């Protein structure tokens, strides 16, 4: 049977971490929590779990923090999960079955993520299907990217999809969604600037409109009713903020 390390990065996750941990206990051979100096009950909650290592590390960045967690894990096979995610019962069974099957190091494993917005599971707006690679051998790839990080592999990989959903409880309020989207947009604008991307005024106009059309019309966001409209309008405004951030940095350099 393969040994699997579950890695999680946290910062003030007392509302979500217990649900996340309870969902990985059935298959985790080790749980590694790398915490960015939380001031709430995150550490206290984690202390109730056997086979869990709680390590504090000042914030390095999304990819860097996740790579640090993977580096200090005991086992080479990694399952990376966010604190606001939960493994469904069906996905738990899929992972348990996978552990008993021989896998090559050039194989990685994905799963569909279903996101909850203010108590409603969103299946349109471009949010579903949201397929994520979360299980792989750490010797074959590392996280990259300032936001919406992805695993960059050093070998040609074969991806297999596991049955079951990764349940994502990311947005419990409209204001929380807006703040997170604008936070990510600002990080994205700064990343564009650091990569030398040229600012064009047209981007601030065209890109938000394109985002809204893609999510609300092409991805059928209108079928989610008022909730879909809220999601798509906020995404469009965040897109504008990303390019406005790039414009501001470009003008001030």
Image: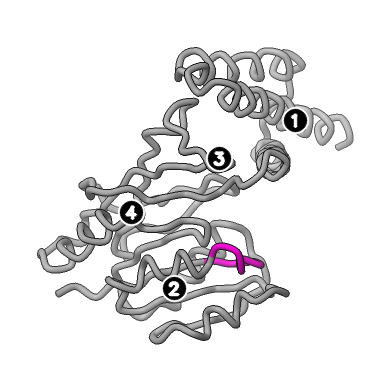
The residue wearing badge 4 is 154
Identify which residue is drawn at 42% across, 58% down: 86
Nearest the eye: 3 or 122: 122
Q: CA distance from mark 1 to mark 3?
A: 21 Å
Camera-side mark, 3 or 4:
3
Identify which residue is drawn at 73% across, 74% down: 39
Stretch in magenta: 9-16
Disc 3 or 4, which lies upstream in sequence?
3
In the image, taking residue 154 as reference, residue 175 lies left or right, namely right
Identify which residue is drawn at 18% across, 67% down: 99
Which percent across, then down, holds residue 129? Answer: 36, 34
Q: Secondary structure at mark 2?
A: helix
Q: CA distance from mark 1 to mark 4?
A: 34 Å
53 is higher (above) or lower (below) than 242: below
Query: In which quadrant of the rendered image does the N terminus lie?
Result: bottom left
Name the disc covering residue 71, or none: 2
Q: Residue furthest right?
A: 252
In the image, taking residue 83 as reference, residue 206 lies left or right, namely right
The residue wearing badge 1 is 241
Q: CA distance from mark 3 to mark 4?
A: 35 Å
Identify which residue is drawn at 64% across, 39% down: 195
Disc 1 or 3, which lies upstream in sequence?
3
Q: CA distance from mark 4 to mark 2?
A: 16 Å
In the image, taking residue 33 as reference, residue 253 lies left or right, namely right
């Amino acid at each position: 049977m393969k040994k699997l390390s579950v890695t999680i990065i946290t910062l003030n996750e007392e509302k979500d971490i217990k649900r996340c941990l309870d969902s990985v206990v059935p298959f985790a051979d080790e749980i590694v929590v790398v915490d960015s100096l939380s001031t709430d009950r995150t550490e206290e909650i984690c202390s109730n779990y056997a086979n869990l290592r709680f390590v504090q590390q000042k914030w390095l960045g999304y990819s860097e923090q996740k790579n640090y967690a993977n580096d200090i894990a005991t086992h080479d096979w990694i399952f990376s999960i966010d604190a606001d995610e939960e493994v469904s019962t069906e996905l738990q069974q899929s992972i348990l079955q996978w552990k008993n099957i021989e896998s090559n190091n050039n194989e990685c494993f994905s799963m569909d993520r279903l996101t909850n917005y203010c108590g409603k599971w969103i299946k349109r707006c471009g949010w579903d299907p949201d397929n994520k690679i979360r299980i792989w051998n750490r010797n074959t790839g590392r996280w990259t990217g300032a936001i919406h990080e992805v695993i960059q592999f050093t070998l040609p990989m074969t991806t297999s999809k596991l049955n079951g959903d990764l349940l994502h409880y990311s947005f419990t309020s409209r204001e929380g969604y807006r703040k997170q989207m604008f936070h990510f947009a600002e990080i994205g604008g700064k990343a564009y600037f650091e990569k030398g991307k040229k600012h064009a005024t047209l981007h601030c106009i065209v890109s938000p409109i394109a985002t809204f059309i893609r999510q609300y019309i092409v991805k059928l966001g209108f079928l989610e009713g008022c909730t879909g409209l809220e999601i798509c309008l906020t995404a469009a405004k965040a897109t504008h903020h990303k390019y406005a951030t790039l414009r501001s940095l470009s003008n001030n350099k």
